[in-house]
Amino acid sequence: MSLTFDQISPVIAEFLDRYGFKKDCEISLAGIAGSQRAYYRLKFGSRSIILLVSPSHDADFGRFLRITQFYRLLRFPVPMVYCIDDVMQQVALEDLGNHRLYDVLLADRAAGLDGYRKALDLLVDLQTRCQALHQESPDIRSRIFDRHHLLWETFYYRAQYLEGHRGLKPDSTFDAYLNRTFALLADTVDRHPKAILHRDFQSQNLMVADDDAVHVIDYQGSRLGSIYYDLASLLLDPYVMLSDAEIEDLLRYFHVKSLSPLDFSGFREAFLQAGLQRVMQALGAYCFLSREKGIASFADHIPNGEKRLRWLLRECGKKEWEGILP
């Protein structure tokens, strides 16, 4: 997926010209989201900027800008917005570099785990200080990740992974089992305490700057939901597969600082419940994006998603849930 300077909106092009970017600046693809939202890095000399190009059907475009403003006002570390073209749905953003927490962990385990602790500090800040002011963001306060949305996630897993990827045929007995199990899980997670939820708080959406500070991207899905869901997104991320010991250490680190009213045993149980939801959603997404959207690289993460889901079922210790992954 490429972009030429002539495809940049006139509004953004005028801004770039004012700040010294010429038509022969270097343009490279910095990333692409499952929604087909594309991010390009523009470089001219020592200057660098990120250009977000949203497809015309992207319902999250306006929400992204409004939530960015909310987080920036609270000094929560999201990128600065320099210029917006609402008509062409392009935005010039601060360049946070190209080191994701994912990359840092793979290159240097100790530095990566330090980054994970910083990310957990941000999650605590999101669920406490930012949560106290969430009424100031209509996009967050008006959307609740409740039982209805939790059931949608497990339906997505059933349709995209069990049926679409595994080829399992609908069966009345198995369907009845899944309906009961997914309803029980949704009811359980919906009862968790709720706070601001990023909804995709994982290693590829956390950027590590040159000063090792962690910044957050891809947050347009923010809403209210289980305080354990983002935690599960980060620590059970199939992209990196943290070890049992690493998960336990980071869980205890977060528990000390978190909103959770539970002792560590109850806290860990709630984390595993949210983890089942999250990892099934991730597996469904990997299958959908690789098969339906043609982004083949997502298929590479299906085996780790399956491993993590098996791990969760074992850790939960509930035999009656094992049929979720035949």
Image (spheres, grey):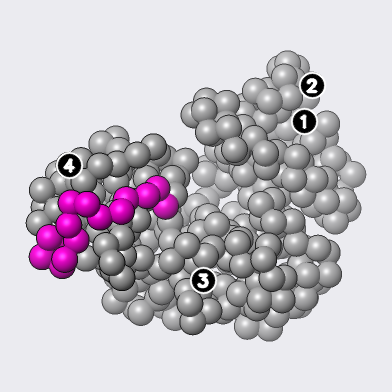
Q: Which mark sits nearer the N-terminus, 1 or 4?
A: 4
Check residue 192 for magenta coloring: no
Q: Secondary structure at mark 2?
A: helix
Task: Please tell me whether residue 48 is drawn above or below residue 256 in the rendered image.
Answer: above
Label 1 close to label 2 by CB (< 8 Å): yes
Marks 3 and 4 sit apart, C-alpha to C-alpha, by 31 Å
Q: What's the amino acid at mark 2?
A: Thr
Label 3 close to label 1 by CB (< 8 Å): no
Q: Which residue is mark 4?
A: 6
Marks 4 and 2 sit apart, C-alpha to C-alpha, by 57 Å
Report crowding for label 2: few under 14, some 14 to 19, many 20 or more residues within 10 A (C-alpha): few
Q: What's the amino acid at mark 3?
A: Val
Q: Which mark sits nearer the N-terminus, 3 or 4?
A: 4
Is 312 or 145 nearer to us in this picture?
312
Check residue 27 for magenta coloring: yes
Tell me the number on the disc at residue 177: 1
**Residue at point 49% right, 29% down?**
293
Q: What's the amino acid at mark 1?
A: Tyr
* Image quadrant in which you'd find residue 180: top right
Q: Which residue is mark 3?
A: 208
Q: How many marks?
A: 4
Residue 203 is left or right of residue 91, and the answer is right
- Camera sees residue 63: no
Magenta range? 16-30
User: Residue 3, position in %: x, y?
Assistant: 29, 41
* Image quadrant in which you'd find residue 204: bottom right
Q: Which residue is mark 2?
A: 173
Report crowding for label 1: few under 14, some 14 to 19, many 20 or more residues within 10 A (C-alpha): some
Residue 162 is left or right of residue 291, and the answer is right
**Residue at point 48% right, 77% down?**
210
Give the mark toward the camera: 1 or 4. Answer: 4
Q: Secondary structure at mark 1?
A: helix
